[in-house]
Image (cartoon, rainbow, N blue to C red):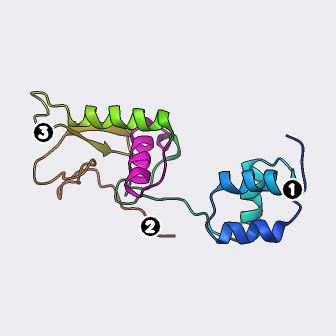
Amino acid sequence: MPNVKVPNVDEVVRWIKDGKKLTWIVDEIQRKYGVKVGYSTVVDIRRRNDIPALIGRHDDLIPWPLRKEHRHKMPPKMLRALGRRRNGEPLGPTVERELDRWLVARAETSPEAPYGTVVHYNPLTKEGWFYVARRPGIDNDLIRVPDEDASVRTRTRRDH
């Protein structure tokens, strides 16, 4: 896409500060000004104006700082989608179906996991993400609550 000038940067800054979604802003610029811009244009405007990103962090579902190579695997993707669903945010139909199948898989029982499985993250491994047996009364959501005597500690995410 060629470089384009946004007709009213101050307006875009106001929309960003008002919490408008990137898709809404891009569509509104197209509708109002007839100018097609990419998401990166809006992100650049946000950065140049020192506006923090409004990313749904879902710290209750992903409390760990993730290594770069682990960020886009299936477990964090599904945990983010679940966080958006719980917040009442819309999901696309494909993500809805994928999340529903993933949740069914977590609830499935087996002799090794009689109460279903939860997500465990270990940043010190190549894989990073694992499905482990749910411990009743301990793992009450979809993530593994770390053991007190765990040999590999995972620190929680710092607030920014």
Question: Would you say residue 57 sits in the magenta stretch?
Answer: no
Residue 77 located left or right of residue 52: left
Question: Would you say residue 83 sits in the magenta stretch?
Answer: yes
Q: Which mark is residue 33?
A: 1
> For the magenta stretch, what is the residue range?
70-91
Q: Residue at x 44, y 67 (%)?
A: 158
Quarter assignment of residue 9: bottom right
Instruction: Compute the Cα span from label 1 to label 3.
Output: 55 Å
- Residue where numbered disc 2 is placed: 158
Residue 64 located left or right of residue 49: left
Q: Residue at x 36, y 62 (%)?
A: 156
- Res 127 seen here: no
Relative image position of residue 110 (x, y in whole percent)? 13, 27
First reached walking from the N terminus: tag 1 or tag 3: 1
Height in image: 130 above or below 146? above
Residue 21 located left or right of residue 119: right
Instruction: Compute the Cα span from label 2 to label 1.
Output: 40 Å
- Residue where numbered disc 3 is placed: 115
In front of the other: 25 or 2: 25
Nearer the observer, disc 1 or disc 3?
Answer: 1
CB atoms at circles 1 and 3 under 8 Å apart?
no
CB atoms at circles 2 and 3 under 8 Å apart?
no
Q: Residues within 10 Å of mark 2 (few under 14, many from 20)?
A: few
Relative image position of residue 107 (x, y in whole percent)? 21, 36
Quarter assignment of residue 114: top left
Nearer the observer, disc 2 or disc 3?
Answer: 3
Instruction: Compute the Cα span from label 2 to label 3.
Output: 31 Å
Tag 1: amino acid: Tyr
First reached walking from the N terminus: tag 2 or tag 3: 3
Tag 3: amino acid: Tyr
Q: Secondary structure at mark 3?
A: loop
